């Protein structure tokens, strides 16, 4: 990335410099476009469910910026010699399920031959340029709210190993296919300015980048972080994705583990697919956010707080 010339334009409100969830382009004082693209390999066995998960994962980036999706295009890599077009049709129907639920339109897309199937969306949304959620918007004093449990990476690894109980799989699929639309609405309604979705880089990776961009530090209360049912047991039995280990390796230079061992640290770094949002709100509005999230069926929790950056250049994230 260092070889690329930086893009500077007064209407590019969010670009690649901060590593945020989506790009934001100002149209005028009241309107901005939110643009993103994301695609994944299969994480579950059922094709239609995979389509739903991949679409929810892609559109999450728009919600994470405080926007609402308008239009999407399918992005497909398909092994046409090994996989039927009927199976691809199921994937696309799953994405349409998500579009219908999210109130946006899928207007076409593009397909290439690929030995390994991949699916996702390119999405265009809109937002108020004066009410964006960004990973540079966290403020000292904020309480951190997480809107979905962690554990998807562990469980999908166990699915691939054939070791995941059906009730655990069902809980993970329900979490991955839940849209972050209501979570974004709650965050904005409670005055949040800082947010990011918790996806491939895990809670430590995404929050770690956010505190760097927001010039703050953060504390994570490990015992308060919700986990999907069966996550710890599967992790203890060895179902730990390589992505989670890479996430922890990246975050370790920012991290004070506070005496917690590798397992707890890895669970905080677990690589999520279509995870929830983590956002910051003023302490007096944290309960309001939890009540609103719980009322809409979220398993949400206060998982830490944001503090002013220390002047000694020490750890930016602390586990307590």
Image (cartoon, rainbow, N blue to C red):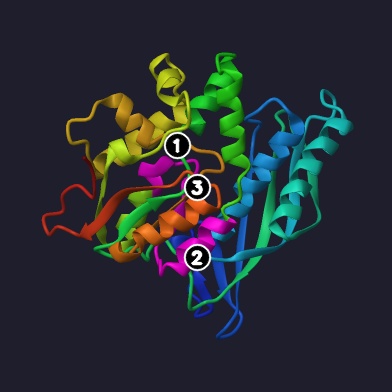
Which region is colored magenta? 181-206
Does 66 lie within the magenta span?
Answer: no
Work out whether 249 lies above or below 133. Answer: above
Q: Secondary structure at mark 1?
A: loop
Q: Which badge, 1 or 2, is on the more N-terminal residue?
A: 2
Q: Position of residue 150 (x, y in %)?
A: 45, 37
Q: Nearer the viewer, residue 146 or 269?
A: 146
Q: Residues within 10 Å of mark 2 (few under 14, many from 20)?
A: some
Report the mark closest to the observer, 3 or 2: 3
In the picture of the structure, the residue carrying the numbered disc 2 is 15
Q: In the image, what residue occupies the spot 51% across and 47% down?
A: 298
Q: Residues within 10 Å of mark 1 (few under 14, many from 20)?
A: many
Q: Position of residue 27 (x, y in %)?
A: 61, 80
In the picture of the structure, the residue carrying the numbered disc 3 is 276
Q: Position of residue 168 (x, y in %)?
A: 55, 24
Q: Which badge, 3 or 1, is on the more N-terminal residue?
A: 1
Q: Nearer the viewer, residue 108 or 280?
A: 280
Q: In the image, what residue occupies the spot 62% across and 30% down?
A: 43
Give residue 171's quadrant in the image: top right
Q: Nearer the viewer, residue 314 or 188?
A: 188
Does 186 lie within the magenta span?
Answer: yes
In the picture of the structure, the residue carrying the numbered disc 1 is 150
Q: Which badge, 3 or 2, is on the more N-terminal residue?
A: 2
Give residue 72's quadrant in the image: bottom right
């Amino acid at each position: 990335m260092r070889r690329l010339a930086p893009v500077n334009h007064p209407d590019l409100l969010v670009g690649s410099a901060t590593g945020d969830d989506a790009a934001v382009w100002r149209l005028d004082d009241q309107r901005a476009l939110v643009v993103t693209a994301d695609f994944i390999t299969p994480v579950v066995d059922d094709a239609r469910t995979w389509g739903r998960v991949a679409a929810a994962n892609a559109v999450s980036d728009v919600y994470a910026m405080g926007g609402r999706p308008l239009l999407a295009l399918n992005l497909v890599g398909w092994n046409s010699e090994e996989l039927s077009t009927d199976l691809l049709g199921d994937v696309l129907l799953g994405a349409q399920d998500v579009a219908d639920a999210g109130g946006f339109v899928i207007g076409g897309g593009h397909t290439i031959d690929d030995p390994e199937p991949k699916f996702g969306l390119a999405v265009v949304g809109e937002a108020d340029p004066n009410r964006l959620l960004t990973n540079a918007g966290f403020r000292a004093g904020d309480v951190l709210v997480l809107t979905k449990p962690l554990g998807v990476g562990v469980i999908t690894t166990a699915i691939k190993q054939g070791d995941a109980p059906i009730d655990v799989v069902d809980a993970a699929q329900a979490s991955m296919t839940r849209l972050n639309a209501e979570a974004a609405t709650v965050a904005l309604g409670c005055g949040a300015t800082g947010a990011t979705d918790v996806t491939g880089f895990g809670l430590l990776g995404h929050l770690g980048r956010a505190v760097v961009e927001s010039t703050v530090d953060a504390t994570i209360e490990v015992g308060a972080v919700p986990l999907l049912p069966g996550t710890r047991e599967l992790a203890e039995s060895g179902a730990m994705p390589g992505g989670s280990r890479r996430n922890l390796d990246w975050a370790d230079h920012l991290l004070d583990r506070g005496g917690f061992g590798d397992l707890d640290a890895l669970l905080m770094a677990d690589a999520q697919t279509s995870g929830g949002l983590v956002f910051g709100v003023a302490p007096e509005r944290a309960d309001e956010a939890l009540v609103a999230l719980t009322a809409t069926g979220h398993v949400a929790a206060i998982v830490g707080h944001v503090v002013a950056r220390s002047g000694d250049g020490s750890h930016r994230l602390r586990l307590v």
